[in-house]
Image: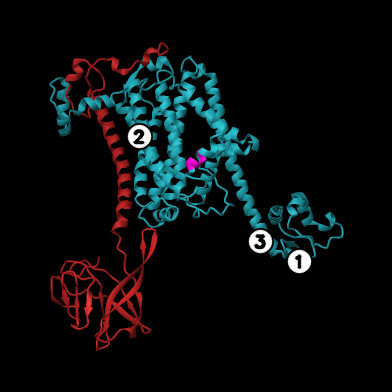
Chain colours: A red, B cyan
Amino acid sequence: MSPEIPPSHKAPDQDPPTPADLEVEVDATEIVSDAVGIRSDEEIGRRRFFKRLIGLIAGVVALGWAVPLAIYGIRPALLRRSPEWTDAGPLDQLGVNQPRELDVVVSRRDGWRQINAVKSFWAYRTSEGHVVAYASACPHLGCAYQWREGQSRFACPCHLSIFSLDGAVLGGPAPRPLDTLQVRVDGGRLFVLPEEFKAGISKKTPL
Amino acid sequence: MADEREHNAGAAVPRRGWLDERLNLAPLLRRLLEEPIPGGASWIYIFGSVTLFFFVNQALTGMFLALYYAPAPESAYASVRFIQESVALGSFVRGLHHWGASAMMVAIGLHILQTYLYGAYKPPREPMWTIGVVLLFLTLAFGFTGYLLPWDQRAYWATQVGVNMIGTVPVVGETLARVVRGGDVMGALTLSRFFAVHVLFLPAAIVLGIALHLFILRRVGPAGPFDEERARARREPFYPRQVFMDAVAILVVFLAVVGLASSLPSPLADPADPSASSFVPKPEWYFLFFYQLLKYVPGRWESLATVGFPVVVIVFLFALPFLGKRGRRPAQRPVAIGAGLLFLTAVFFLIAESIRQDRLLAAGDQRAERGKAIYQQLGCVGCHRIHGMGGAVGPDLSYVGDARDRDWLIRHFRDPQAVVPGSVMPRINAPDEDLDALTAYLLTLKK
């Protein structure tokens, strides 16, 4: 050490620990402050008081961070976006009992971006004049099924699930009928709610 | 309570925690908490802990901000706006980071002030001070790089000015500026490297620096009071009283930052537009004194201020602990204390002056804006022409600000014929403040 260092600035290690120091067994947080290791009741009470207050403050700050940061980090991931009614074109493009795959442009938010995606669905008119629409994903594992004109059936090429015109499972591994979509007709145009559903389970559940 | 009494009486009953029994924490904790403070605990020593607290705050909130931030010119601004407006508590978390950054600067300032005033940088604490100075500049670098990330007008133009300042360094300036920018103009590469530096390089460096700073503190011990008598009179361990004081200070500053974050929105201007050169950039307040200083420096001495001044400050800070062999008392260090006071006075004067000029400018703008409305209202446009708009009965006012001063205009409004005999201009019977605003507007009409 250089000579200009005043005596009070010697490194603290220079007090060797006394044997008494090493023997005292205490709760790690209840530390004896002086080398002798004797504490009065008052001293113990004082230390306990400080310990509790420090713990309380640490808890307040930790919660003050943890709660908002957890909400901030998790909330947006749990938000469900609700599908919007989307124009699918004129109603007269649909034939009676002749399913057709229609495309709609669905605009959705992707974080800070607005994305336009093309989604397709199957739709036909019944002989009573209603419109029936199915989500384009096979309820088995989400493949795109097709309408087999000659057999009047929907068939999925992936795992060979087969559905009737009204969506019922005729064969293959599909756990549930085709997923119907909500439709409405307004001024001769077809509007659809382009929802998606979980694949592989027997109950129709929105994604 | 009972077992503590027994313990006290000497019949030691070991009462150790579950983890302590396994990891033998007591000696470690003792070593951490028993650090003796010469002269005892004091509120004056809280600033180091408060600074460390804010570092943790910046690190934590920064990690969470990164969840939704995308560092590219096309996405940076939109993602920050997304955080600000769409993410649950997004504006709060961003506020914690924004106000936390400012608060950290304040804490560092006070920490340095205390160290300086107490002469605590003197031997044997030169290494601790040196690392501390490095930490200061790392923190300023955090401020500079972080400021660009929202990629709004403020960010873009303030950084433009900052990088151009680097460009005024003699000989290597241009090269240096290119390296900082990642090219010859600001753009995607500037943003990506500022981001990388802000969230990867600087954190690594500062964590190392903090660890060293604390390690040295534990090897050398805290300095304590500059009064040797008082330092020797009493020794008190770091725990519990100093820890308690630090904790109370941390709670207070935390609540303050929470209050700011939840009541004042963090600034976010329009998206960066490299072609909108009329934007007047202003740096964050902790660079404001420097920004203001540049206003007083004539053009040819520019690099003296942009380079010379920081170099002098840096050299002074690093050399400080090796200057002056006398004691730590302020009375023994007239030069150091005098220089410090001068520096502080200059900094506060410059900040105040910058804020004052800004206010004046803003107030002037407002008055001129109102004056413009009054000009339309009074129908001046019927006789006078400004940049091709209006009648040709009276003089063209396009550059009236160059031709007339305030006094002349006001006198003329009140009684045109007294000032210009034979003038056909009618008197303007409007309250003084309207005339004032009208004058302010006309004075903005300059070449």
Instruction: Find out whether residue B398 is within the magenta segment.
Output: no
The residue that disc 2 covers is B207
User: In the image, are marks 2 and 3 on the same chain?
Assistant: yes
Sequence order check, earlier mark of 3 and 1: 3
- Which sits in the foreground, A25 or B303? B303
Report, in whole angstroms, how far the alpha carbon at label 2 lies from the one at label 3: 56 Å
Q: Earlier in the sequence, mark 2 or mark 1?
A: 2
Residue at image position (43%, 36%) is: B139
Residue B264 makes an appearance in the image: no
In the displayed structure image, the side of residue B403 where residue B322 appears, left or right: left
Query: What residue appears at the point 78 percent right and 53 percent down from the top-left corner?
Result: B411
Q: Which span of residues is magenta-colored?
A: B176-180
User: Of the residues shown, which amino acid type is indicated by label 1?
Assistant: Gly
**Viewer-proximal residue among B238 and A180:** A180
Judging from the image, what secondary structure is the residue with disc 2 in? helix
The residue lying furthest to the bottom in this view is: A127
Determine whether label 2 and label 1 are within 8 Å by CB.
no
Dot 2, how many residues are within 10 Å of its Cα: few (below 14), some (14-19), or many (20+)? few
**x and y percentages locating residue B65 in the rendered image:** 37, 48
Q: CA distance from mark 2 to mark 1?
A: 69 Å
For disc 3, the marked residue is B373
* Callouts 3 and 1 in the same chain: yes
The residue sitting at the right extreme is B422
Q: Is residue A110 above or below residue B351?
A: below
Q: Which residue is drawn at the image coordinates 76% and 49% (left, top)?
A: B407
Q: CA distance from mark 3 to mark 1?
A: 17 Å
Q: Amino acid at mark 2?
A: Val
Tag shown at residue B391: 1
